[in-house]
Image (tube, helix red, strand yellow):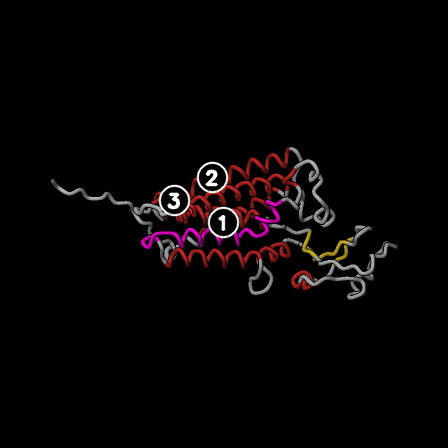
Amino acid sequence: MSTIAFSSVKLYLGAISLVLSVGTLYSVVNSTYLDTSDPLLAHLPHPLQSTDYFANKANPLNTVFIKNAWGWTSGAFALLYATSSARTQSWNRLLQYVVATLAWLAFTSWFFGPPLIERVIVASGGQCVVVVPGSGEIIDVPFEHCYTRSPLSPATHPTLFASLTSDFTPPNPWSARPRLRKGHDVSGHIFLLTMSILFLADQLTHSWRSPTRWSLPHTLAVNANAALIAIWMLATCATALYFHTPLEKFSGFLLGVAAFGLTQLPPLSSPRAVTEPIPCKDD
């Protein structure tokens, strides 16, 4: 990694650390964060959603951007790469994207079975649970139901609901998808936002170092990437303020940095184009 690339990544790494630290400290001092691993709280609306815009999970920042974060990041990278000059396009950059995508899949979707984040929850004492509406009673169910994300109901799985102690009967028809709770719920949002910011910042260094004048499409692509990084910073701040415990946010940050680090291993880290002075002709 060149000096300017390393400096750029360090700058954004410091910015993420600052935003996350200040936001987390504020959330602890003012009790604004929701413990998403608590089965009695995780399914409820955030207590501050009526007064704090970003505490409401239905806000566009969450539903449009964060929920599709890697899709947005992928699109931004594709636009940046496609409009780059030929000398800054390389297989190394494409392989870096592939590695980052595989890291995203491994942590959030699939890793020879359950994703790594779910494995962490289970290993740290998590349980697969269903919260019964009305009574709020929690039913422990086998882990495979969380892994398959299959809906459960008294009609389809009567034995699982036979342990209900209250007289409350769920409405019919009713079903719910079980969720992993009670363990260490690594913040997947912080993980992905951290990796996305660092990845895009690193890719932008190819443009900053290019000796070729930017075309109009590439100028727009650079601005779009910078704007998306700003959105991811805002999303990081919102998550730090309102969701997950401090330790869960910190672990998500470390995993995001580690995932980005995979893209910087020697076989993948490509040299940046270096600006060279244009020689002058003698009179």
Question: Which callout, 1 or 3, points to the residue nearer the camera?
Answer: 1
* Contact (Cβ within 8 Å) of mark 2 with mark 3: no
Helix, strand or loop at label 1? It is helix
Helix, strand or loop at label 2? It is helix
User: What residue span does the magenta drawing correspond to?
Assistant: 60-88
Mark 3: which amino acid?
Phe
Mark 1: which amino acid?
Ser
Residue nearest the observer in this picture, 206 or 32: 206
Rendering coords of residue 192 (x, y %): 54, 50
Give the CA separation, mark 2 to mark 3. Answer: 12 Å
Give the CA separation, mark 2 to mark 1. Answer: 15 Å
Question: Which callout, 2 or 1, points to the residue nearer the camera?
Answer: 1
Q: Residue at x 57, y 52 (%)?
A: 68
Q: Alpha-carbon neighbours of circle 1 within 10 Å: few (<14), some, or many (≥20)?
A: many
Q: Residue at x 43, y 48 (%)?
A: 221
The quarter of the displayed image where residue 139 is located: bottom right
* Contact (Cβ within 8 Å) of mark 2 with mark 1: no
Rendering coords of residue 264 (x, y %): 41, 52
Query: Which label is found at residue 14?
Result: 2
First along the sequence among labels 1 and 3? 3
* Contact (Cβ within 8 Å) of mark 1 with mark 3: no
The residue at which mark 1 appears reads as: 196
The quarter of the displayed image where residue 130 is located: bottom right
Query: Which label is found at residue 31?
Result: none
Give the CA separation, mark 1 to mark 3. Answer: 16 Å
Residue nearest the observer in this picture, 94 or 122: 94
**Image quarter of the C terminus:** top left
- Residue furthest left in the image: 283
